[in-house]
Amino acid sequence: MGKLGGITVIDLTQFLPGPMLSVMMADHGARVIKIEPPAGDPVRTQAPFEGGNSVWFTQLNRGKESLTLDLKSEAGKTALRALIAGADVFLEGFRPGVMARLGFDYPAVKALNPRIVYCSISAFGQHGALAQHPAHDMAVQALAGFLSVNDGADGMPVVPGAPAADMAAGLTALAAVLMALIGRERSGQGDYIDTAMFDSLLPWAAHTAGSAIMGGDAPRSSAQRSLGGAGFYQVYRTSDGHHVVLGGRELKFARNLLGALNREDLLPLAEAPAGEQDALIAFLRDTFAGRTRAEWIAWFAQLDVAFAPVLNFREALDEPHIAERGLLVMAGGAHHIAPPIRFDSEPDWHPGAVPAQAPGQAPQ
């Protein structure tokens, strides 16, 4: 049954944050009823496709039920009210004010079910100067300061490779929902959660934006130990045009590598403040440029250094570690990324079916 067996979730969200939250609940036994508009979840049409479904849709909606409701119609509203009466969690991801206009804001839903945990997910929260500002992940990252340090050597910010604001919001909202469910066991009452992508991402700057957090200047990537200012936390190009990284600044790693390269004289630079390691970085850059990526992988195999090759997703998913950990599962004609949360007391995980879009009907 899973840890969340017996929990019913009404999910009106689309795209990334909300569906990521609810699929993690579905993966662990919750009954998730996905409410889709008449046109369907837009992600259903996003290529590529495998097993008859969008890969994106599959990863974030397996194990859910689907129900199509027109919430602008009285029939759709009536069906949703009936579902709410027996639900534990209500998720919505519309712009602030939309749910009130539809008649399903928290006061209205609480009146139907005082025990429900109601979670809103938006870009900037339900109140504040930016509440009505339209934004997806990159715009939130830009306004939160993160894009300024997602830059290349020329200082030009680049499009981020991971939707950090989306995923931070989904994880934060999941934690909040589970906390509220635990609290409900004590109080008997549900609660309202206002989750913002902006708010959720901001704590992720704790180790990179310290100077700004304490009221000082904004960090510069070239002078930050975790953003490109340190030789042992850096990306290097190899002779065949690939890249490798050094991903650990502990002195023992520097000692091990520089000793193996007969350059112990550079060890003091590895301890120097970020931004003052240019000579070390230049040496390592020239060194890594002298061999292919494969040659460096072999060379580092027996060396205790936080080294890794930069892999593309095909290479990464083909790594033996993926199979050894059971992180990619084939079921129903499609590949599934396995949930990162697994419990020793439970049997091996198997993905639930991907829901077809079902027409609206009276809830069971």
Image (tube, rainbow, N blue to C red):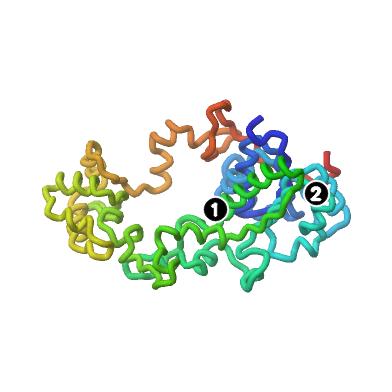
Residue 266 appears in the rendering: yes
Instruction: Using the image as rendered, state which of residue 172 and residue 122 is in the foreground.
Output: 172
Crowd class of label 1 (few under 14; some 14 to 19; many from 20; radius 10 Å): many
Which quadrant of the rendered structure holds the C terminus?
Answer: top right
Amino acid on which the number 2 mark rests in the picture: Pro
Q: Nearer the viewer, residue 326 or 121?
A: 121
Give the number of the disc on residue 114. Answer: 2
Mark 1 belongs to which amino acid? Answer: Met
Q: CA distance from mark 2 to mark 1?
A: 29 Å
Residue in the foreground of this view, choosing between 16 and 340:
340
**Position of 39 compared to 218: left or right?**
right
* Above or below for 327 versus 244: above
Q: Position of residue 330 (x, y in %)?
A: 54, 34
Quadrant of residue 210 within the rendered picture: bottom left
The residue drawn where x is 70% and y is 51% is 91
Question: As drawn, is 177 to the left or to the right of 267?
Answer: right
